[in-house]
Amino acid sequence: MRLYAEQLQDNLKAGLKPCYLVFGDEPLQKQECLDAIRQAAAAQGYTERHSYTLDDNPEWQQIEASCHAMSLFTSRQIIELELGEKLPRDWAEKCQSLANALHPDLLLILFGPRLSAAQTKAKWFDNLSRQGVYIPINFPDSRFFPRWMQQRAQLNGLKLQPDAVQFMCHAFEGNLLGAAQELEKLALLNLSQPLGLLQLQENVTRQNHFTPFQFIDTLLDGKVNRAQRMLLQLRGEGVEAGMLAWALARELEQLLMLRLACDHGQALGPLLEKARVWSSRQALYQQALQRLTTERLHQLIAVTVQLDRAIRRFETEEAWLLLQSLSLGFRHDAALKLVSA
């Protein structure tokens, strides 16, 4: 079963599942989901918790011993496994053993960073998600962020005017933890409500944060002006131009492959599945391919070649200018400006 973070509380009221898989890169929602599961488990008699980090040398013997010990005693227990970016070599085999060991007095919680498309299609994931609940933790889409902000404000007893909601969304985009903490602080100030733009400007420190992945998705969505703001902030936060160049080049090669296949009459849906594009990103790819012609994609890839050359020569300013030009190029009517070699 797959649930979104905001659906978890209602699902827990119906009873605990044997296991929960909580994966994603947004720290606030991830921590709140884990806390909600633990609280629901404590209310149902799960009094002991064993936590393990699965690094290069997992404590498999200790983990397996905990599983077997649970069947000998009446107390209910939780086993939590924190996974990293790279799974242990024997993960598939050990995970199957854990799945077989599940019983009513054992609750298994797995959590870690965002899973790749290949990992969500693996046998171990399919087996556990069928027995339990998978909760992907993502940053709210920009379209739904104002709703999240309103709901979070209400949880803190705050009412925000429409312009105040927009200000908070711009001030904390990509930083839900910062937004939650700031709303808690505002609640303590006892300001007159509903809060307006002027009050927030006087009392709020902007803490927006973006990831390279959000930057890429914004370009696919065609929101190039927003992407320009994100690019400036990423540079200010010390993100390397080379990292962004690599990600853009990979994305453009994927887009060109899909564009050429579509030009030859192939259906986009099966192509996206074959390319293992996340279902949550398929609409972004469809929008991008509607805007970007084969000619435009060739032009953008030509800019990435020049960008790679600038990075190899340590020409930092030129590299960032080319990244700006690339960003603008994701809008179909934008003229591409290349930097002279």
Image (tube, rainbow, N blue to C red):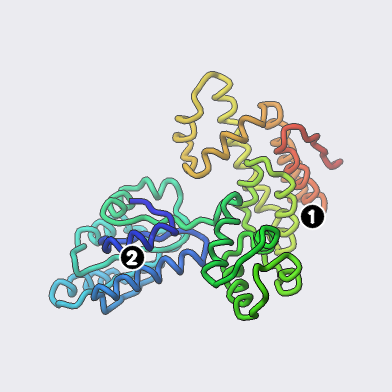
Q: Which mark is residue 124?
A: none
Residue 23 visible to an observer of this rendering: yes
Determine which residue is flagged by label 1: 316
208 horizontally vs 202: left or right: left
Determine which residue is flagged by label 2: 109
Secondary element at tag 1: helix
Percent of width and height locating residue 116: 46, 50
Kindly identify the residue that appears in the image at 25 percent across and 56 percent down.
Answer: 96
204 vs 135, nearest the viewer: 204
* Rendered view: 187 above or below 296: below
Amino acid marked by disc 1 = Thr
Percent of width and height locating residue 283: 54, 38
Task: Count residues near mark 1 (Cα–Cα under 10 Å), then give few for <14, some for 14-19, many for 20+.
Answer: some
Task: Count residues near mark 2 (Cα–Cα under 10 Å), then give few for <14, some for 14-19, many for 20+.
Answer: many
* Rendered view: 28 above or below 123: below
Amino acid marked by disc 2 = Ile
Kindly identify the residue that appears in the image at 34 percent across and 73 percent down.
Answer: 39
Kindly identify the residue that appears in the image at 65 percent across and 80 percent down.
Answer: 189
Percent of width and height locating residue 145: 58, 55
Quadrant in which the C terminus appears: top right
Kindly identify the residue that appears in the image at 68 percent across and 48 percent down.
Answer: 245
Secondary element at tag 2: strand
341 vs 218, nearest the viewer: 218
